[in-house]
Image (cartoon, helix red, strand yellow):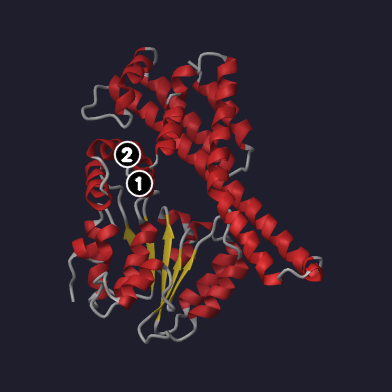
Amino acid sequence: MTVSAATSVWSGLVGQKHAIETLQRAVDGHGMTHAWLFTGPPGSGRSNAAIAFAAALQCERGGCGECHACQTVLAGSHSDVSITRTETAVIKVDGIRELVLRSALAPAQQRWQIMIVEDADRLNDSSGNALLKAIEEPTRRTLWLLCAPTVEDVLPTIRSRCRSVVLSTPSATEVADFLVTRHGIDPGVAAYAARASQGHIGRARALASDEATRNRRREVVTIPTGLTSLGACMNAAQNLVDIAKAETEAVGEEINARERRELDAVFGDDRKARTSRSYKAALSQLTESQKQRGKRRTLDVVDRCLMDLVSVYRDVIAVQVGASGDLVNEEMRRDIVGLARGSSPEQNLRRIDAVFAAREKMLEFQVPPLLALESMMLSLKL
């Protein structure tokens, strides 16, 4: 049964007509397979697509978006849909082994046992090999839905056994229309958020709905115009780290406090229980997990800031080569024109390379963010 994308589980996917058609055909019985790999740039909605696909598969009407099955899958509470997320650098093998054991269970509601793994690019050799065996020998009613930025980010042995669904970056017009029609955002704010997010739906929502988020981004994109001295470069690097830490703490503080309360509730108010070895071990494990999660969040925020910086230099190059259309940072066109007059396209390409080099140092080689950003800012100096 084919359902309308506008009123179904697919309605939250922006600019993904081809992917929706592929998935809906599979739901209708054409081209179904036991393992899928959803890829696309950050913010394209690959995990949302996987969850929508799971909802459509569990729905007796093929993804109506209104029934109990659809609503529980979309809410993350369906008994036969497991969603694995990680906020650490790698997905550990113990977690995958537990997931594999769960995947062998028969579905409680007689349709599908669906295992969604977000950030499949964070599988290491051990966890990847544990997952590979389950994908190679799936049970009859089990489906694996993996998500990653690109197919190259997933172990070759795993990606070769999956059917690929590639999501694209939605256009600024599509994102702006989505914000206006689905979230009631003012058209002017929606247009700004759509451009500034560069197609990242979650980022666009945050920019459209939160003034503090908009202010933090404005602080980042004005950095290039102020890099006129060694001291300014060092200050800019420190400010970027401070922005990332502040945002990380704002997001993580409430979650960390809730997790601590939940741990304390398990052991109760008994003083003896609170001083036991098991409590101390659990607290130590929780503290370490929160620390690693905080480091990852900080890196994610820094990474997003770096992409905002890249957008400025791409705008500068666009002005220099006379490209038509709006700039990503249209609201600061005057500053961008000034940067364009004082530099060459080649210089700005080298600056973009410097940003990506800093990104690689932090994400791949674990160089401390401040050190990597200081080196980068010196390369960006006017």
* Image position of 82 (left or right of 188): right
Q: Residue at x 57, y 30 (%)?
A: 373
- Precedes in sequence: disc 1 or disc 2: 2
Compared with 218, 295 (above or below) is below
Q: Nearer the viewer, residue 162 or 362?
A: 362
Residue 205's disc is 1
Q: Is residue 139 visible?
A: yes
Badge 2 element: helix
Image x and y of residue 334, in percent: 32, 17
Q: Which residue appears at 59% of the width and 49% of the height?
A: 253
Dot 2 alpha-carbon crowd within 10 angstroms: few under 14, some 14 to 19, many 20 or more: many
148 is higher (above) or lower (below) than 356: below
> Which residue has dot 2 on it?
193
Residue 160 shows in this picture:
no
Rendering coords of residue 323 (x, y %): 24, 26
| Residue nearer the viewer, 46 or 242 | 242
Position of the N terminus, as image quadrant, is bottom left
Q: CA distance from mark 1 to mark 2?
A: 7 Å
Q: Nearer the viewer, residue 325 or 226?
A: 226
